[in-house]
Every structure is written in C-alpha cells, then in structure tokens.
Amino acid sequence: MTNFLKKRIGRIVILTGAGVSAESGLNTFRDSGGLWEGYDPLDIATVGALDSNRDMVLDFYNSRRSQLNDCLPNLSHLAISSFQNNFSGHVFLITQNVDDLHERAGSPQVLHMHGSLKSMRCDYCAEEMKAIEMFEKSTICPSCGKAGKLRPDVVFFGEIPKQLDEINIEIEKADLFVSIGTSGIVYPAAGFVAHARNTGAICVEINKERSEVTNLFDTSYSGLATEEVPRFFSNLLLKNEI
Ligand code: BJW
C-alpha cells in the first residue's frame, strides 16, 4: 500500500528492535532459534539472575559481545543512516538493541534505550565505562579497583530504560513514528506507538510478521528489514510517499 503524504513530515522518530539486526547474523530474542530458546528470560535478563548466577549472565553477554566482531551492518542499518544523513528534517533514532550496528552503519545519532554491549558499569563505584571484551565476576573494576560488581551496561527487566524523558519529548513532537523489527512485547517500548498516535503522529510498522501492537499502526509493511526498510526510506525521501 502506498500513500502520498498530505502533510509535510518535519520530525520523525524511528524505533528499532532485534529484527533489524537479524539479517546481520544476530539472533532475535523470541523467534524460533532465538537467543532465549531454551532459557527462561528471567534466568538471564534480571538483576536477580545477575546476583544469583553472575558468571552465567556475564558469559551470556561476553559471548554476544564477541559475536559482534563477526557481524556487519546490513542494508536496513545502512538505509536508516543514509536517511538520517540526507533528510532535511529532524530524525531521532531509538534502538532497543545492545549491538553497535547502527553506529557502524554511520548513523549520526542513536539512543540505546536498553543499553549497550560496548559499555559496562561497576555497582560499587557506579562508574560507566567502555566494556572490557571479556569480563567475569573476579575482574577488577578499572575505576575503583574492587572485584565482583562489574556488569554489562544493559537494561534488565524491572530496571528503567535509559533517557525516557528525552524519548517521550521526541515522540510527542513527531509527525511520523516508524517501528522496525520489534515484537511489541516489551514495555515501555511497546507503548510508544500508542503514545505517538495519541500525540498526532502517523505510525508505520515494518516487521517480518505481525507484532503484538500491529493494530495500532496506520500502515504495516510485512517483510524482511533488508528489503522493506531501504524501499520505505527511499520512497519517503524521494517521492514523499509512505
Ligand atoms: C524481523 C526480521 C527481519 C525477525 N526483518 N523483522 C507495562 C508498562 C511498563 C512496563 C511493563 C508493562 N508490562 C510489563 C512491564 C515490565 C517489563 C515488560 O515489558 N515485560 C514484558 C515481558 C511483559 N518491562 C520492563 O521491565 C522494562 N522496565 C520497566 O518497565 O521499568 C519500569 C518503568 C518504565 C517506564 C515507566 C515507568 C516504569 C525494562 C525492559 C528491559 C528489556 N531488556 C531486554 C534485554 C536487554 C539486554 C539484552 O539485549 O540482552 O531488552 S529484554 C529483550 O526484549 C531486549 C530487547 O531489546 C527487548 C525487545 O525485544 P525485540 O527487539 O522486540 O525482539 P523480539 O525477539 O521480541 O522480536 C523481534 C521481531 O523482529 C519479531 O517481531 C520478528 O518477527 C521480527 N523479525 N527477523 C524484519 N529479518
């Protein structure tokens, strides 16, 4: 379905999820064969799991950090960065992903609302720093010199996602909200479409299959991110179509 835009789109918020990185070889969370197949997410992505089984949780994130070295940004990351660099209005990119593929594709601005594998922090001194490639429970914090409390700087269930105030302001000002490759299961990100709708944005979803919140979008494109995302942003930039 193609619609010519009747109003000028000046401000755009883009939200990405694991589906945008799937074709770079990074598993999603909930698809079959995904990161959590065979695991209970509550055994990994919670503060309780970190406290009770720190080495297992750190291993899980060490192996995902190491996997990043074998991956490259795909055509959807590149299309988003090209759009950010060429659109005359304001584009605000929010990702739920902890990988660095948007940055490596050349995106000039990325907000990592669930944190980043490239960053770690110490629960003793609260210092945030560039992550050591592999670290374990016994690794000494480079900042305070104590061992036992380094953790990946990612947002677990029950923790508050990063920069939510800034995100809400951007959503409230947006003319267009585009969600790409996310299942719409995890809040507060799953609630952004409702917020964007209520504050007047046109809402577009691009996903391999229906998400939990597809019914809230004005337009949904079903397909692979590497095909649909370049097509969508090129139509928007060159023809003012969604
Ligand atoms: C393709 C494709 C291809 C595949 N092309 N598409 C109501 C309101 C507020 C909170 C809650 C609420 N109800 C429950 C909560 C609490 C909880 C929650 O949401 N639980 C649900 C399970 C119900 N949320 C929280 O705890 C959050 N914090 C919080 O709520 O704080 C309190 C608060 C907030 C705000 C205001 C006031 C109070 C924190 C959530 C943290 C999530 N953390 C994780 C782990 C991060 C570290 C890591 O990466 O390991 O984040 S969980 C995991 O899920 C990860 C992801 O970012 C996140 C979302 O997953 P995503 O990206 O959607 O992946 P998938 O696998 O689910 O879907 C992939 C999609 O891609 C699929 O649809 C495929 O079809 C598609 N796809 N290949 C296009 N090639």
Image: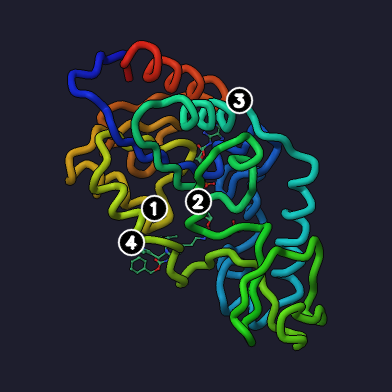
Distance from label 4 to label 1 (Cα)? 13 Å
**Nearest to viewer (mark 3 / mark 1):** 3
Q: Are marks 2 and 3 in contact (CB under 8 Å)?
A: no
Question: Depth check: 163 or 35 in front?
Answer: 163
Please identify, in this view, whether the residue under mark 4 or under mark 1 is nearer the observer. 4
Disc 2 within 8 angstroms of ligand 1 (CB): yes
Residue 87 shown left or right of residue 65 in the figure: left
Q: Nearer the viewer, mark 2 or mark 4?
A: 4
Q: Which residue is mark 4?
A: 165
Amino acid under label 2?
A: Gln
The first of marks 2 and 1 along the sequence is 2
Instruction: Give how far apart the Cα atoms at labels 4 and 3 are.
Output: 30 Å
77 or 90: which is nearer to us?
90
Please state the horizontal and vertical placement of residue 19, each as a whole percent of the image. 55, 38
Q: Which residue is mark 3?
A: 75
SS class of the residue under badge 2? loop
Residue highlighted by disc 2: 96
- Label 3, secondary structure: give it: helix
Dots 2, 1 in contact, CB < 8 A? yes
